[in-house]
Amino acid sequence: MGEGFRTLFYWVVVEYEPREITVTVDLHVIESGLKALYQRATERSLERPTLVILPMLVDFATSFDEPHRRVSELAEQIGFRTLDATPSFLSVDQKLEHFRARSNDLHLNERGNAIIADILMGIINKSP
């Protein structure tokens, strides 16, 4: 696994602090991770890679629309197709915390996984 990808994974998984209201993101770190992920994905697929952006399963007072938009633009510049899954989640339930596997766990529960499965099937069905 490339260093950029490990750094991106570390930031997303390890650096999460549930008590924090603000999140500081170094887009250079994300860019490095996305480039490593894109290279890996293109080596293993004939299709253009798609990056599905998952919602934060935390109901902060502020939205993640702007960070999601910036990551989406960056990913598209690198070569990904992007899809922000947040609207799909919010159309089912306005409280994103209701999609957690457990109250202290940021993994998706069955309902959240079903939404992602529907999104992925839509992407697959649109592929030539």
Image: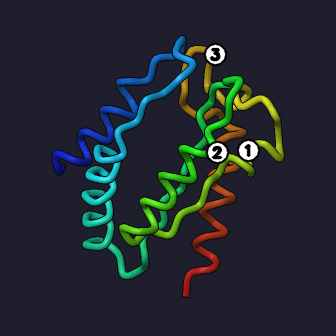
Nearer mark to the viewer, of 3 and 2: 2
- Judge from the rendering whether residue 32 lies leftward or rightward of residue 60; answer left or right: left
Could you tell me how far apart the alpha carbons at marks 3 and 1 are, in whole angstroms? 17 Å
Q: Earlier in the sequence, mark 2 or mark 1?
A: 2
Which residue is more in the foreground, 12 or 112?
Answer: 12
Which residue is more in the foreground, 127 or 81?
Answer: 81
Label 2 crowd (10 A; few <14 / some 14-19 / many >=20): few
Could you tell me how far apart the alpha carbons at marks 3 and 2 are, in whole angstroms? 23 Å
The residue labelled by disc 2 is 65
Could you tell me how far apart the alpha carbons at marks 2 and 1 are, in whole angstroms? 13 Å
Nearer mark to the viewer, of 3 and 1: 1
Above or below: residue 96 compared with residue 3: above
Q: Quadrant of residue 111?
A: top right
Nearer mark to the viewer, of 2 and 1: 2
The residue labelled by disc 1 is 89
Labels in figure, total:
3
Mark 3–mark 1 CB contact (< 8 Å): no
User: Measuring 65% from the left and 60% from the top, which residue is drawn there?
Assistant: 119
Q: Quadrant of residue 66?
A: top right
Q: Position of residue 78 (x, y in %)?
A: 36, 67
User: Measuring 32% from the left and 53% from the top, which residue is drawn there?
Assistant: 31
The residue labelled by disc 3 is 103
Which three-letter amino acid code belongs to the residue tagged 3?
A: Ser
Q: Position of residue 34 (x, y in %)?
A: 33, 55
Q: Earlier in the sequence, mark 3 or mark 1?
A: 1
User: Measuring 82% from the left and 36% from the top, which residue is drawn there?
Assistant: 93
